[in-house]
Amino acid sequence: MSDHDTPKVSPALLFSRLRSSPRRLQAWLRAHQDENIARGQLWLGRAIVWLAAVAVGFVAVIFAIMTDDATHFFITNAREYPWLPFVLMPVAGAGLLWLTRRYFVGAEGSGIPQVIAEMNRPPDMPWRPLVSLRIAAGKILVGVSAVGAGFSFGREGPTVQIGAALMASIGRFLPAGLQVQQRHLLVAGGAAGIAAAFNAPLAGIIFAIEELSRGIETRMSGMVITAIVLSGVVAQAWLGNKNYFGQVPVIGEASEILHTILVCAVVTGIAGGLFARMLLISASGWRGRLGDFRRDHPYRFAAACGIFLAVLGYATGGLTYSSGYEETRNLLSRNEEMPWHFGPAKFVATVISYLSGLPGGIFAPSLAIGAGIGQDLMPLLYQDAFPTTVLILCMVGFLAAATQAPITSFIIVMEMVDGYSLVIGMMAAALLASGISRMISRPLYPTLAEIMVERQRIAAQPQPEEPPTPPPVDAAAPPADTPPAKP
């Protein structure tokens, strides 16, 4: 076709089409109004969840920096002034417990049982919230102070409760058409918290499936993974693309170190089962003089725990103070030797810290206890496996036995130390240690959550009315049925 055959559009026709375009657009929008509204609500909901996940990552990083700085400050001053823990720890124990009970009820303990209990709350029962922004603020404030005062706590479990609180707080801003349940937000926030705390995204996904939801729904998997990825990106942007404990050399295939796996799993399974059982007894039905003293005088008991921890820390040269992260990293990456009593002393320090009732987690201390046990087993296994292999297997075994979450435990440690070459051995150690622990103790976090729900159920029940107190009897007055005396 030649240029002369090209149809020409007159200016009037072009102007007419331009004038009709807005009307056509309006007609199309009216025809697809419901679809466009639904699509807009979907993207608005996604944007809100993404922003919340980024906030979880930022808060986890800030919490980590504050905890590390507080730990470093305490350790440095405790070395320079050995008397400081004897003054600071009992005062901090009583004062922080009062602050928790007065302003931040629900922030006690690890934080993971609170999230599980909040997910399983009965719908028709009065309920005191266990996950809220106020509790999250208290978890950070009191948690950093407790670790900074030398108590044997970690920050990873509390980050789960903090992440769940941040994610749950956005529920009222989500469009109603999305039909996102509060339970979904709690799982997503808790999983994002554990991923950002350990800088281990895969561990966050498995933690959501194994520990929090215990059978995750398909419809929420995208939300969980998105929250984990975004919080993990923020954590890596600030903390760097590095493993929690750095690059750790491991040697040995699972078939070659079977004896090492069995020994590590059995020892840590028994130790972790006893550890979990002691924590559960203290939370459910601790009887005897000490149990009664803690119930009747909680602040004095917390101060006594501080004194005990100060004595233990002084006797061990400060090895039992705070989370134990530095000691574990030194064992793994710097090949520094610890005294034989590091593992048992850290075990006792963590139990006593938990008994105090202060906010704090057990993940990092459990890894330190496992590393200490591994160092004590090295003389028995040095011919079968590389030293760091024994340490890693014991860390996995003790964490799996204490939490009875074997898959989460071995994936957390695998991502922390880049131990993919030992993945089969870690899986075997985690599963065997968890199975041994089940013969000694009930699962730690679900059982603690059941106790919390039951306590709220009892508190919600109406109390029986007491009979009215009779008026006091005047000894000088005659009984009511006694006739008056004759004059």
Image (spheres, rainbow, N blue to C red):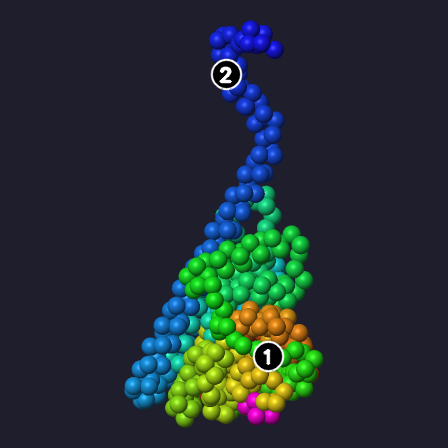
Q: Visible in this render: residue 295? A: no
Tell us which disc is closer to us: 2 or 1.
1
How would you rate the neighbour count of disc 1 (Cα within 10 Å): few for under 14, some for 14-19, many for 20 or more? some
Disc 2 designates what residue? 18
Q: At x 49% / y 12%, what residue is drawn?
A: 15
Q: Which residues are magenta?
A: 376-380
Q: Amino acid at mark 1?
A: Ile
Q: Visible in this render: residue 204? A: yes
Q: Earlier in the sequence, mark 2 or mark 1?
A: 2
Question: Magenta span has 378?
Answer: yes
How would you rate the neighbour count of disc 2 (Cα within 10 Å): few for under 14, some for 14-19, many for 20 or more? few
- The N terminus - image quarter: top right
Q: Amino acid at mark 2?
A: Leu
Disc 1 designates what residue? 251
Residue 289 in percent (x, y) is at 51, 91
Dominant secondary-structure state across the stretch colored magenta: helix
Q: At x 50% / y 60%, what residue is drawn?
A: 232
Q: Residue furthest left?
A: 81
Q: Is residue 236 above or below residue 99?
A: above
Residue 234 in percent (x, y) is at 45, 58
Residue 53 appears left or right of 211: left
- Residue 238: image quadrant is bottom left
